[in-house]
Image: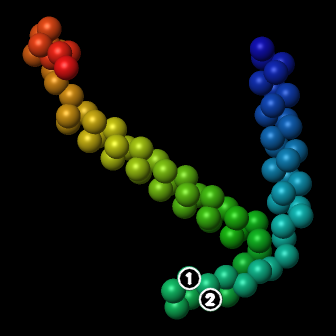
Amino acid sequence: MRNVKLGVIITLSIVLMLIIVQNTTPVPGRFLWFSGQLPAIVLLFITTTGGFVTGLLVGLFHRQANKEKRVPYSQYTETTYRM
């Protein structure tokens, strides 16, 4: 199992390095009133990080909302599960 994890880590590292090396050309980027040239990998990193943070926040807020709806264990009865 340890060798499988090591193989996956090495493979992902090589793929990441290839992506970085192949995406160094500048691309135009605009956000609201900001504009400029960015290397493609920086733009990919920014959008990926933004998507990750958005998903993380949605998950945390969803978990918090579910936690508030839960009935404490001490209040469970047979009638809780009736339809």
Mark drawn on residue 35: 2
Q: Are marks 2 and 1 in contact (CB under 8 Å)?
A: yes
Q: Identify which residue is drawn at 67% across, 62% down.
A: 45
Mark drawn on residue 52: none
Quick check: 55 left or right of 39? left
Assign a secondary structure to mark 2: strand
Q: Residue 50 is drawn in which quadrant?
A: bottom right
Can residue 74 be seen from the camera position used here? no
Q: Provide the residue designation for mark 1.
A: 31
Q: What's the amino acid at mark 1?
A: Phe
Q: Residue furthest front?
A: 83
Quarter of the C terminus within the rendering: top left
Q: Is residue 21 above or below residue 35?
A: above
Assign a secondary structure to mark 1: strand
Q: What's the amino acid at mark 2?
A: Ser
**Which one is nearer the viewer's eye here, 66 or 42?**
66
Indicate the position of residue 37 as horizontal and vertical percent values.
Answer: 72, 84
Indicate the position of residue 52 as horizontal and vertical percent values.
Answer: 55, 52
Quick check: 64 left or right of 80? right
